[in-house]
Image: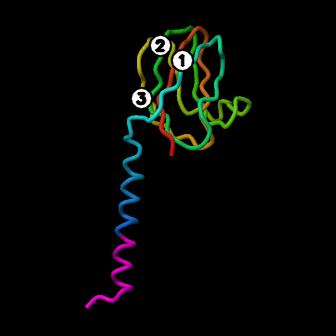
Amino acid sequence: MATLDDILTTLKNGVIAINNLSQATQKYNPGQYTSSVITSVSGSTLVTTGAGRLIYVTVLVRGTGDGFCYNAANIATATSSVAIGVCPYAASGTYLVNSIFTSGLVVSPGAGQSVCVTYSLN
């Protein structure tokens, strides 16, 4: 007959397995939130702080240069070393990015661009 320790260990292992499965499938999340439209006129915008995943970049209006998305907690720290995605200028459309951010999400559209992003938070 199983002891109480055996039963609790089995229950614990089941919880750990469910948690691991949840984390593994999180990257397939279609996105919880969509930002408002961010234009080159408004410039770099802090969309959210904290950890999450950038799912899509949608280019609504083409521009004359690429924009970028950054893993940054504020606009001042949004530099090329923390870029996680591109807002391509060549064509309007929705682009799958699927990148993790840990600090926050800053979006900086290219010249003439209007974009929005779809993302999930942890």
Start-end of magenta stretch: 1-13
Which numbered tag is attached to residue 60?
A: 2
* Mark whose residue sits in front, 3 or 1: 1
* Mark whose residue sits in front, 2 or 1: 1
- 22, above or below 118, in the image: below
Residue at image location 48% in from the left, 34% down from the top:
119
Which numbered tag is attached to residue 96?
A: 3
The answer to whether the residue labelled 2 contacts the one labelled 1, judged by CB atoms less than 8 Å apart, is yes
Q: CA distance from mark 3 to mark 2?
A: 15 Å
Q: Residue at the far left: name it.
A: 1
Residue 95 among magenta residues:
no
Asked if residue 7 lies left or right of residue 111, the reply is: left
Q: Amino acid at mark 2?
A: Leu
| Tag 2 secondary structure | strand
Percent position of residue 77, x then y: 71, 34
| Tag 1 secondary structure | loop
Q: Earlier in the sequence, mark 2 or mark 1?
A: 1
Residue at image location 39% in from the left, 40% down from the top:
29
Which numbered tag is attached to residue 37?
A: 1
- 78, above or below 108, in the image: below
Task: Count neighbours of disc 1 (C-alpha within 10 A) and say few if under 14, some if 14 to 19, many if 20 or more.
Answer: few
Q: Amino acid at mark 1?
A: Val
Q: CA distance from mark 3 to mark 1?
A: 17 Å
The quadrant of the picture occupied by the N terminus is bottom left
Task: Count neighbours of disc 2 (C-alpha within 10 A) and say few if under 14, some if 14 to 19, many if 20 or more.
Answer: some
